[in-house]
Amino acid sequence: MKTKTKYTNEPLGKMKVIDDFLPAPEELAFKEDNVKVTITLSKASVDFFKKEAKKQHVQYQKMIRRLLDLYTIHHQEVSNK
């Protein structure tokens, strides 16, 4: 059984105020420009992504999209060097 934390009115010690570094909520809820396409994938690939997405509690299509985005970013950086 967990022991209950007892709070007291003791001094906290030397504290430092830091600047707010978190993005505003509207910066977190960005909408990317997406293009709907039809693609045929192997059953093994789709099954893999569905299984992994279920473990992570996300949509498998988003995982595939993210993989393609990362691949694109990597190869754009390589070709720009």
Image (cartoon, rainbow, N blue to C red):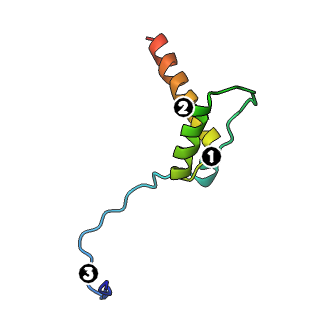
For badge 3, the amino acid type reads: Pro
* Residue 50 in the image, given as x and y percentages of width and height: 59, 43
Q: Residue furthest front?
A: 43
Q: Secondary structure at mark 1?
A: loop
Residue 59: give its label: 1
Q: Along the line of sight, which residue is nearer the eye, 75 or 20?
A: 75
Q: Give the CA distance from mark 2 to mark 3.
A: 49 Å
Q: Earlier in the sequence, mark 2 or mark 3?
A: 3
6 displayed left or right of 21? left
Q: Residues within 10 Å of mark 2 (few under 14, many from 20)?
A: few
Q: Along the line of sight, which residue is nearer the eye, 9 or 71?
A: 71
Q: Secondary structure at mark 2?
A: helix
Q: Along the line of sight, which residue is nearer the eye, 63 or 51?
A: 51
Q: Secondary structure at mark 3?
A: loop
* Residue 14 in the image, given as x and y percentages of width and height: 24, 69
Q: Residue at x 27, y 76 (%)?
A: 12
For badge 2, the amino acid type reads: Leu
Q: Nearer the viewer, mark 2 or mark 3?
A: 2
- Give the residue number, with chain letter if any, for mark 3: 11
Count of numbered circles on the image: 3
- Give the residue number, with chain letter if any, for mark 2: 67
Q: Residues within 10 Å of mark 3 (few under 14, many from 20)?
A: few
Q: Residue furthest left?
A: 13
* Residue 26 in the image, given as x and y percentages of width and height: 64, 50
Q: Residue at x 32, y 87 (%)?
A: 4
